[in-house]
Image (cartoon, rainbow, N blue to C red):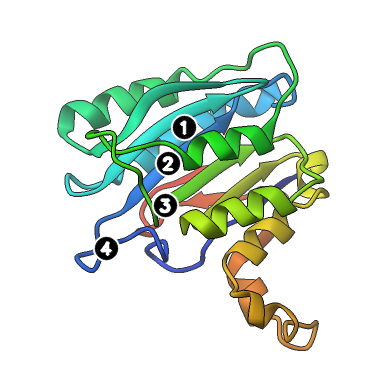
Amino acid sequence: LCTALASASPRWPGGASAQGRLRVKLLVDSSSTMPTERLAQLRQALDRLIGQLRPEDQLSCSRFCDRVVHDLPRLQDCTEAYLRRARTLARHIDTDLGPAAPGAALRVAIAITDEDEEPVTQACILLVTSSPIWEIEAPLQELLASEHPLHVLAVGQDAAESLWRELALARNIPFEELRSLTKHSPLRMACRFIEIDDVQFSGYRGQARAQL
């Protein structure tokens, strides 16, 4: 089972400037919860996804287990050399022995600065995780305060059945709309939540695809 929480729009809302530039903080679960049989597909998907970024886009790359490791620690412009390094890192993502702390990892990702070490707001966090989350109030408040949209690819049943969906949906719907979202008005949920057995992980420009 692979469950994806992602925007259905060709470009991620909230992480693009008026000129269409994307600002993406990639956060990948490398804890012992990540199924090793999914690593090859995950590496391929991330490689292809990163390969679709344009020079005007910005990217940072981090991994987490019980701590966060910043492979590309600042949100930087996607030059050819920078993307080449990012794709190399994606092709060699592995798992580490140890538990995961996804809530703490989200806080660290929110705090990632740009290359001038200035605070960043309105950058998309793309989280790939097999770890469940059950306490979402604190990360939700931090995501809202920092104006970071959250997009989640949850790998495996444990992550899929936890509260990632609720966190992603709540982050991307204003609080005043939460009360009116019912089973009779599923449009926003349909746009943000896709669940199939063999997910085709599509790049935000509709070009990059890899089987997970």
The amino acid beneath tag 1 is Gln
Mark 4 and mark 1: Cα distance apart in space: 28 Å
State the residue position of label 2.
25
Element type where label 4 sits in the image:
loop
Query: Mark 4 vs mark 3: which is more N-terminal?
Result: 4
Q: Report whether 2 appears left or right of 191.
A: right
Nearest to the eye among marks 3 and 2: give it: 2
**101 w.r.t. 94: above or below:** below
**171 w.r.t. 4: above or below:** below
The amino acid beneath tag 4 is Ser
Query: Mark 4 vs mark 1: which is more N-terminal?
Result: 4
Quadrant the N terminus occupies: top right
Check residue 44 in the rendering and tell me which mark sits there, or answer none.
1
| Residue for point 60% across, 49% down | 152
Q: Position of residue 3 (x, y in %)?
A: 69, 50
Mark 1 and mark 2: Cα distance apart in space: 18 Å
Nearest to the eye among marks 4 and 1: give it: 4
Quadrant the C terminus occupies: top right
Element type where label 3 sits in the image:
loop
Residue 124 appears in the figure: yes
Element type where label 1 sits in the image:
helix
Q: Report whether 154 appears left or right of 56.
A: right
Mark 4 and mark 3: Cα distance apart in space: 18 Å
State the residue position of label 4.
17
State the residue position of label 3.
203
